Image (cartoon, rainbow, N blue to C red):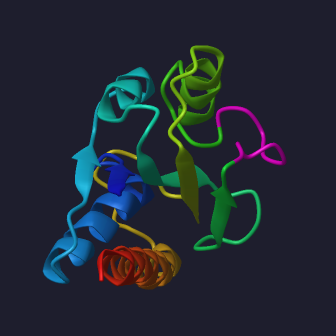
Amino acid sequence: MKVICCGNATRGDDAAALLVAARLHDLGIEADVHQGGALELLERWDASDEVILVDAMLAVNRTGTVHCWTNQLPSSIPSGTFSGHTVGMIEALELADVLGHTPRSLQIYGIEGRRFGLGEAVSPEVLEGVAEVVSRVAAKVAATASTIHTSVL
């Protein structure tokens, strides 16, 4: 299982996923940090992988709200919600689908944020969302490890 956390440490709430990665590392769970463009995400996995993606998204509801999509792309959110880049994460994942490069299993966590200015602090509500995502990802990793361990016995 690959956990990939996308964000920018200098842009307020966009650091949410990077905080998730740091807390997962503290728990002994490997999480890759991706601070590049969305298209480079496609290089992080192959079609046989089980992938969890974590990213901040522009708030359309309440700051700190956590969304999770499993084996589907978010269709109920506006385009550009996940990224300030020209090509956002959703567009990159759509391209992966067209190219047949979508991971075998894909789970996407989005944490809604409002502060994305250079040098801004992470919102307290986003920190609550970070804690929720850490808990959910850690539980998923533990469940997967337990299943693998049981099937080996």
In x, y percent, where is residue 62?
A: 71, 72
Q: Is residue 29 left or right of residue 102?
A: left
In x, y percent, where is residue 147?
A: 42, 79
The quadrant in which the C terminus is found is bottom left
**Vertical arrangement, residue 12 with respect to residue 37, above or below:** below
Residue 108 appears in the rendering: yes
Residue 113 appears in the rendering: no
Main structural element of the magenta stretch: helix, strand or loop? loop
- 87 or 51: which is nearer to us? 51
Q: Residue at coordinates 65% horizontally, 42% vertically from top-left?
A: 81
- 147 or 68: which is nearer to us? 147
Q: Residue at coordinates 33% horizontally, 45% vertically from top-left?
A: 118
Q: Residue at coordinates 41% horizontally, 74% vertically from top-left?
A: 144
In x, y percent, where is residue 109?
A: 55, 61
Q: Is residue 74 magenta?
A: yes
The quadrant in which the N terminus is found is bottom left
Which quarter of the figure has residue 21? Answer: bottom left
| Number of marks in the rendered image | 0
**Vertical arrangement, residue 98 with respect to residue 147, above or below:** above
In x, y percent, where is residue 68?
A: 64, 64
Q: Which residues are magenta?
A: 72-80
